[in-house]
Amino acid sequence: MDALYPRLLVRDFPASAAFYQAVLRELLGVEPVKVLPGYANWDIEGEAGLVLFDRGRLAAAIGTEDLPQAAQDMAMLVMKVDDVDTAAACLAGHGATVVAPPQDRPDWAPTLRTAHLRDPEGNLIELQSY
């Protein structure tokens, strides 16, 4: 059920995908579940283990594309939830800052809904349902 997993936000997607494809194959015997332009994911025992995502694409989605590369997010924690709107309100109620409010993302996946927030330390969190 992919409830919680890391997503690395990478500048050079082809090089990063090739690196992790080779390393995860050799060390864990894991092949990617999906590799698309700007997106790749690997499952371990049926659960999401690692996801790569194009950093520029996410920066455009959350409005940080004008920041210098060094100031852009390099990773985020992804949480699959039943209701993105309710979960975003919960996190905000506990001190998270909303970066991108709940919204449908049909260009990412047909039924995907996301919200992006920052925890009190500034770490990026994506809430998602699909």
Image (cartoon, rainbow, N blue to C red):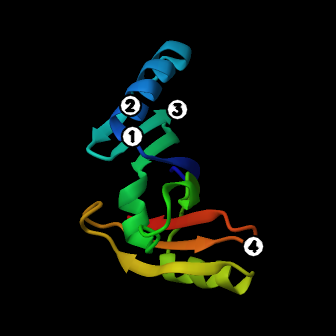
Asked whether the beta carbons under mark 3 and mark 4 sit within 8 Å of each other, the answer is: no
Q: Is disc 4 placed on a helix, strand or loop? A: loop
Label 1 vs label 3, nearer the camera:
1
Q: Which mark is residue 12?
A: 1
Q: Which mark is residue 120?
A: 4
Instruction: Kindly identify which residue carries mark 2.
Output: 15
Asked whether the beta carbons under mark 2 and mark 4 sit within 8 Å of each other, the answer is: no
Q: CA distance from mark 1 to mark 4?
A: 29 Å
Amino acid marked by disc 4: Pro
Crowd class of label 2 (few under 14; some 14 to 19; many from 20; radius 10 Å) = few
For the residue pair 71 and 44, the one nearer the viewer reads as 71
Q: CA distance from mark 3 to mark 2?
A: 22 Å
At which x and y percent is residue 128?
A: 47, 66
At which x and y percent is residue 73?
A: 55, 58
Quadrant housing the C terminus: bottom left
Horizontal relation, residue 52 to residue 93: left or right: left
Amino acid marked by disc 3: Ile
Judge whether 47 appears above or below 96 on screen. Answer: above
Instruction: Kindly identify which residue carries mark 3.
Output: 44
Crowd class of label 4 (few under 14; some 14 to 19; many from 20; radius 10 Å) = few
Q: CA distance from mark 1 to mark 3?
A: 24 Å
Amino acid marked by disc 2: Ala
Judge whether 85 appears above or below 23 on screen. Answer: below
Compare marks 2 and 4 and give the one earlier in the sequence. Answer: 2
